[in-house]
Image (cartoon, rainbow, N blue to C red):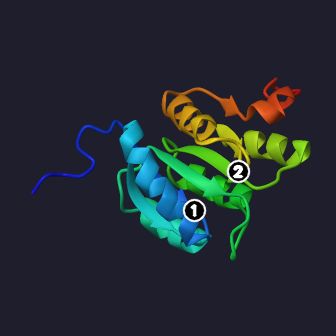
Amino acid sequence: MTDPHEGHTILCVLVDDHPGVIDALAQVLPAEGIGVVGRAGTGAEALEVIGRVPATVALVDLALPDTNGIDLSRDLITAHPGLSIVLYAADVTSGGARLARETGVRGVVLKESGIGELIGAIRTVSGGGIHVDRRLSALAAPGPA
């Protein structure tokens, strides 16, 4: 049997409590060279799934039923230091985006952005870079140390 993720160098877990969002992204991302290796609808599911799949990136919704994306990202980064996180948010304040970055989140993308912005963020963080949604670009500059 052929591995459906063969040839994908970016392996992504999708964490969102809206099945339609996950289903749509799972259809689009593989065509862009991003393998979807897991799905989760809660923080608890995300911790379990990411503990057993070879993910390089996690796309994490800010608002989950059992936690928030920033706290979940902190837990994921602690447990899996090589994992890059993209926070995918319907709404985020400048303070929230800054807190996410201080937590170790490598990317922040607003859900109102196009799919190209999201794909760019996943590619950038998987390569070790930082991506902040262009609508939040003023937050890209590092804060005080």
Q: Are marks 2 and 1 in contact (CB under 8 Å)?
A: yes
Q: Identify the residue at horizontal 89%, vertical 27% (top origin).
A: 144
Q: Identify the residue at horizontal 52%, vertical 72% (top origin).
A: 45
**Which x, y percent locates residue 130?**
65, 29
- Up-down relation of residue 39 to residue 74 (above or below): below
The quarter of the picture where residue 37 lies is bottom left
Q: Is residue 39 in sight in this rendering? A: yes
- Image quarter in which the C terminus is found: top right
Residue nearest the viewer, comparing 27 with 80: 27
Query: Among all residues in the image, which is located at the extreme top?
Result: 141
Residue nearest the viewer, comparing 4 with 28: 28
- Element type at marker 2? loop
In the displayed structure, does residue 100 sit left or right of residue 131? right
Q: Is residue 47 in sight in this rendering? A: no
Residue nearest the viewer, comparing 9 with 24: 24
Numbered tag placed on residue 145 in the rendering: none
Query: Among all residues in the image, which is located at the extreme left?
Result: 1
- Disc 2 or 1, which lies upstream in sequence? 1
| Residue under numbered circle 1 | 21
- Element type at marker 1? helix
| Residue under numbered circle 2 | 111
Report how far apart the C-alphas of labels 2 and 1 lie in the structure.
10 Å
In the displayed structure, does residue 76 sit left or right of residue 53? right
Q: Identify the residue at horizontal 66%, vertical 31% (top origin).
A: 131
Circle 1 Cα neighbour tier, 10 Å, few/some/many (<14 / 14–19 / ≥20): few
Tell me which amino acid carries mark 1.
Val
**Which x, y percent locates residue 7?**
25, 37
Residue nearest the viewer, comparing 78 with 139: 139
